Amino acid sequence: MNSMKIFSGNSNLALAQDICSYFDFQLGKASVTKFSDGEINLEIKENVRGMDIFIIQSTCMPVNDHLMELLVMIDAFKRASAERITATIPYYGYARQDRKVAPRAPISAKLVADLLTSAGADRILTMDLHAGQIQGFFNIPVDNLYASPIMIKHLADKYKDNDLVIVSPDAGGVERARAFAKRLGASLAIIDKRRLRPNEAEIMNIIGEIENKNALILDDMVDTAGTLVQAAEAVHQREAKSVSACCTHAVLSGPAVERINDSCLEELIVSNTIPLNNATKQSPKITMLSIAELFAEAIKRIHKNDSVSSLFI
């Protein structure tokens, strides 16, 4: 494999620079701008012929702009004769639309997969897909990393007394919560909820022992934080010693940060798959952990055609 270069769109430039610092080289020179009517304009300012290209781009807010940036970049590198293009997408937007939940509903996660493949991506590198089956939407290799090594290390240091219970906010997250509980030597609880409409949920019941324990609510993403705050209040009412939360993707749209600040949560631990805005950074309850080193290690192994399986835990 020829030499490697890392480029970035506008969605997560800081993460891309952190990944480059792991390799001790500069981020690739490319300019992603817009014409006056909003069209994406890309200029690659160095030769990429025959190279192994990694494009770092989270498809976070504004989702459609960042997705289009990524597609335009993939197409440009393909036409510039790059040998291989890996779309490195720390946060994969539209992942929640992975199946038909109502008549005549789209499966937008599949549509995005088709767009990325048609644009010319040779490989996908992402983290904590909302639904693991999205990997099967692609006809190219997909590596779905997990933030768990970073999160578990932080939590193990914080909860050394082992008086911890991992709480899954719904039945779909039980497998993830069980894996965390096993690694941390913690017990497991499950919140039984009934979703009324998108971004709204009603807490129904808690299965498991919560009383006098440090409760950690675990999810893959937090969007408007309505469900998270409801879950935290339900756990708090069960006389938990403390209530915290942990998620990989801090979407935090709308009133999310205000809700978290006003809630009974002591801390929300997130990763930087999505860059934090100023309001989020200033929140005393939100702690950010960097996943740059994990992505850098995966990129290095992919470039060298080494196994990345040991990164999946």
Image (spheres, rainbow, N blue to C red):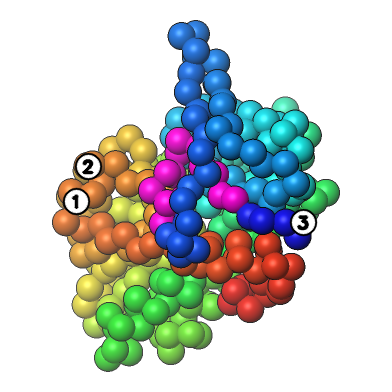
The CA span between labels 3 and 2 is: 37 Å
Q: Earlier in the sequence, mark 3 or mark 2?
A: 3
The kind of residue on which mark 1 rests is: Ser
Contact (CB < 8 A) between labels 2 and 1? yes
Q: Position of residue 82 (x, y in %)?
A: 73, 42
Name the residue tied to disc 1. 283
The kind of residue on which mark 2 rests is: Ala
Classify mark 2: helix, strand or loop.
Answer: helix
At 32% from the left edge and 74% from the top edge, which residue is drawn?
215
In the depicted structure, whether residue 106 falls above or below residue 95:
above
Name the front one of labels 3 and 1.
3
Q: Is residue 17 magenta?
A: yes
In the depicted structure, whether residue 93 falls above or below residue 127:
above
The kind of residue on which mark 3 rests is: Pro
Q: Earlier in the sequence, mark 3 or mark 1?
A: 3
In the depicted structure, whether residue 209 falls above or below residue 84:
below
The CA span between labels 2 and 1 is: 6 Å
Note whether residue 137 is visible.
Answer: no
Contact (CB < 8 A) between labels 3 and 1? no
Q: Which residues are magenta?
A: 5-19
At 36% from the left edge and 38% from the top edge, which residue is drawn?
253
* Structural crowding at the residue carrying mark 2, measured as other residues with C-alpha within 10 Å and reported as few (<14), some (14–19) or many (≥20): few
| Quadrant of the frame with the C terminus | bottom right
Q: Please name whichever residue, 21 or 161, is drawn nearer the observer in this view of the structure.
A: 21
Name the residue tied to disc 3. 141
Name the residue tied to disc 2. 279
For residue 46, what is the image quadrant? Answer: top right
| Quadrant of the frame with the N terminus | bottom right
Viewed as shown, does residue 18 lie left or right of 280?
right
Viewed as shown, does residue 274 lie left or right of 81?
left
Q: Please name whichever residue, 127 or 69, is drawn nearer the observer in this view of the structure.
A: 69
